[in-house]
Image (cartoon, rainbow, N blue to C red):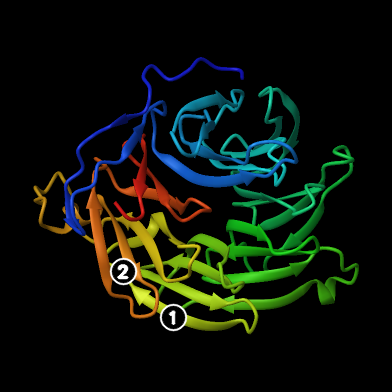
Amino acid sequence: MAAVAPSSAPSSGAAPSGTGGRQIPIVCPGHTRPLAELQFLTCDEPDAETRTFLVSACHDKMPMLRDASSGDWIGTFSGHKGAVWSCRLDPAALLAGTASGDFSVQVWDAITGKSLFSFPHKHVVKTLDWSPDSKRLATGGHEGILRVFDIQDPKKAPLEFVQSPKAKISVSKCSWIDNSTVLAAGEDGSVRFWNVDEADPAKQLIRTLSVDGEAGGIRDMELCTTTSGKTVLTVSAGQNVTFFDMATFQQIHSYKMPVHFKEEGGASLHPSGKKFIAGGGRRGGSMALGAGAEGELGCDLKVYVYDFDTGKELEAHKGHHGPIRCLRYHPDGKSYATGSEDGTIRLWKTDP
């Protein structure tokens, strides 16, 4: 791809744990600024070995592709002129999309790293996602407009869905739930379900889910289909992680965290549906004020593991030197990745 490899290979570094025993994660260097988003993708090819990739978006303008098991660097998508907030592979792992602070979205050949085309926007783009059939790309950001681009006809004007006619509501995350429906998470604490194939504007918004009014804007959103076949929506906002059953659209649980998600962080549900991880920003205190390792500042350096049914803390691992800004479970559930303000990605074992 169009960039040089990181200066050093992934390494293991001692990571004292708050609870749950000592764990030494794989440390993946290469980025030079805070991480913004992580995505795992397992690619199943006929007559080929199943392989899982990890892509990372970062403020250093250099989204990267890695092997998900080893953390080994594969390539860098080089070309953006602003921070990259989102990076996603399409379901076939043949294309990559990146959303940037340079007011653009770029589509790349995921094999060669070549930029195929760019979609200009009028403000910072914070999120994007591929449709399950890889034919369309949804984007959102500070404009408060969900856009859907036709990848088979990239010069065609995108479909546009304004989040609210009364006020501009930034879109922080978007996810396709099927080839016609896109979920858009807003800074007003609501997840809007859009039927992007509906021609009648009055019928395009089909559902809205909202988190607790005190939670604030949504920082992270994840759709996970568990091994039992249940699809769960995980929403991180304010100081809460909230779970919704996508079959009934009812709230399952909402747990208050020891960190907040005002500027960073998120949560991810284990594929079994039995536990989840979370990490985020400071609850209070600052390094300048001398907050100690056991005080408020120390808490934002950890990744927490919780029981899904009870909200009980199971583990708390410390290894990063800055707040955790993004995290996701590996699709097989045996490991998870965290990205931090310290510019590193760490790969942790689910059951060390």
Q: Nearer the viewer, residue 317 or 188?
A: 317
Residue assigned mark 1? 253
Q: Nearer the viewer, residue 247 or 342?
A: 247
- Label 2's element? loop
Q: Viewed as shown, does residue 55 lie left or right of 16?
A: right
Q: Is residue 285 visible?
A: no
Residue assigned mark 2? 257
Image location of residue 108, percent across then percent down: 70, 31
Image location of residue 94, percent across then percent down: 72, 35
Residue drawn at 33 percent across, 36 percent down? 26
Q: What mark, if any, has residue 289 been given in the picture? A: none
User: What is the three-letter code of the residue carrying label 1?
Assistant: His
Residue drawn at 69 percent across, 22 percent down? 112
Above or below — where is 71 with respect to 334? above
Q: Quadrant of residue 182?
A: bottom right
Q: Residues within 10 Å of mark 1 (few under 14, many from 20)?
A: some
Residue drawn at 42 percent across, 40 percent down? 35
Image location of residue 314, percent across then percent down: 26, 67
Q: Is residue 281 visible?
A: yes
Above or below — where is 148 with respect to 267? above
